[in-house]
Image (cartoon, helix red, strand yellow):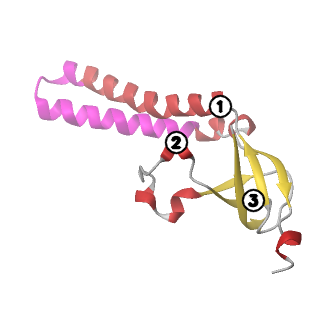
Amino acid sequence: MINKGIVQKSENGFLTVVFDRPEACGECHACNRGSESCAKHTVIIEGTANPGDTVEVRIDDSHIVMASALAYLIPLAGLILGLIAANFISKNELVMAACAFCGVAAGYGVMRAMNPVFSKNRWQPELVSVTNNHNKEGGN
């Protein structure tokens, strides 16, 4: 998937890029209830760009699917394991709910601990191209 965005800030090899909301989002506003901050993403690049430049950023679709699957499946596995453990501890519903909650929390903990492994280069967006917009704005 390739997205175009406008560079807002360039600092120490990091670009803050504002992307247009994809058409698939429609008027959903699930990301921060439609605020402007939901469209801002910071990407790590191996290149340079200036504020105001248009950039194309690519991330492999299979990585998006894998990241989404892990984000849902690891906490779900924690929930199920918590319920299984609760079944051996007690049949009390309050105990089962607490164990399920602890299982989900443990799943999120596993995700957080594995984040450095998941965040290696293959999961990072890649800068495809930079278009200098400063020459176009010079006449205004």
Image quadrant in which the N terminus is located: top right
Q: Does the magenta stretch include residue 110?
A: yes
Residue in front for this viewpoint, 25 or 101: 25
- Residue under the point 33% across and 23% down: 81
Q: Is residue 96 shown in magenta?
A: yes
Provide the residue designation for mark 1. Answer: 61
Callout in the foreground (3, 1): 1
Secondary structure under tag 2 reads helix
Alpha carbons under labels 3 and 2: distance apart: 27 Å
Disc 1 packing (10 Å; few <14; some 14–19; many ≥20): few
Give the labeled residue for mark 3. Answer: 14
Q: What residue type is labelled 3?
A: Phe
Q: Residue at x 14, y 24 (%)?
A: 90
Q: Name the residue under label 2.
A: 24
For the stretch drawn in magenta, the main secondary structure is helix
Mark 3 / mark 1, whichever is N-terminal = 3
Which percent across, then down, holds residue 5?
Answer: 70, 56
The relative height of residue 83 versus residue 128 in the rendered view (above or below) is above
What's under tag 1, amino acid-wise?
Asp
Task: Tell me which label, 1 or 2, sits earlier in the chain.
Answer: 2
| Region in magenta | 86-114
